Every structure is written in structure tokens, then in C-alpha cells.
Image (cartoon, rainbow, N blue to C red):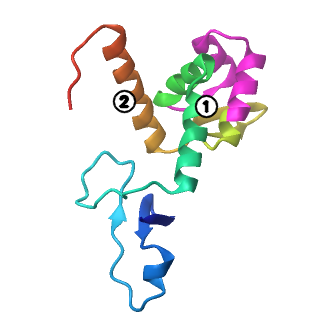
Amino acid sequence: MRKAVGQLGGHQQAAEPASVLDSGPRRPEPVVDVGSGVDSGAHHPEQLAEEQVSAAVSSLSMLAEPTRLRLLWALRDGELGVTELAERAGCRPTAASQHLSKLRLAGLVDQRAQGRARLYRLKGGHLHRLLDEALAHADHLAHDLPHHD
């Protein structure tokens, strides 16, 4: 059984179980890229770390609400304010603001002040790619398109 022990530069490191770690010199730990979509030549871990699973479930659950998904989709092209986001998501600004607060607390969006306005943007390229892939997959399902690699 392998256990993930931390992240460095967006890469997950894997380590042997404690019994192997305590038995002498360690062999080099493989670096596993779990989100770039690029084959780095590293091996995927045999088991996901509990922290990784928890973080993924938390992030994906934020995408499982239609208004939040629309808000995130609108942010793919750059920063927007609450009023514009609400318009694009088809909701009231107060509802958009509440959803954006949850997305910010979940670490999916960043916020900055510009005068009295608050501008939001996606936090990182992983989320941008995740949205693209999730909605491309949904398009295939909705329109009965063939799946591809």
C-alpha cells in the first residue's frame, strides 16, 4: 500500500508505508502529476491519500450546483464583477455573491477589490481544465456523441 505524503509544485509525492520507511535507506520517491493532463512518465499511486480524496470531493461538490457551475464557467475568460456574473449565470446578484463566497472559501476562486467592486477570477489552471473537460464530457452525454481519448 502506498500513501501520499504531500505536494510540491502541484505534484503529489508518494511514499512507502511506515514499515518500509523505518527499515533503512529510502529509495527515491516517484513524483505523480495528478492534474496536468500531461504524461510526465511518473506512475499513479496505487491508492489515493485521504487528504487528496477529501479535497477532490470538496471541490467537485462545489461544481455539482448549477448556479455555481455557471458562475465558474463565466470566469473562464477572466475577471468579472458580481453583477456581470449574476447576469451570465441567470441569478440575482445577492445569490451570485453567496455562491461566490462559498467558491472562494473552497479555494476555487480569488477575489480582489477594485474601488467598491469585488472582482472574481478562477484560482489556477487546474480548475479551468477541469471545467473544460467536465463540460465537454457533459456535451458528449447530452448529445449522444462518441467518446474519445
Comparing 100 with 61, the one in front is 61
SS for dot 2: helix
Question: How far from the left and from the top, in percent, is residue 79?
Answer: 57, 32
Q: Which residue is drawn at 56% across and 28% down?
A: 63
Task: State which quadrant residue 42 falls in.
Answer: bottom left
Where does the magenta region start and end? Answer: 78-102
Comparing 104 with 114, the one in front is 104
Residue denoted by label 1? 62
Q: How crowded is mark 1: few (under 14 residues within 10 Å), some or many (20 or more)?
A: some
**Label tally:** 2
Question: How far from the left and from the top, in percent, is residue 60?
Answer: 54, 34
Q: Does the magenta stretch include residue 115?
A: no
Q: In this view, does 145 lie above or below 63?
A: above
- Residue lying farthest to the bottom in this orientation: 24
Disc 1 marks a residue whose amino acid type is Met
The quarter of the rendered structure image containing the N terminus is: bottom left
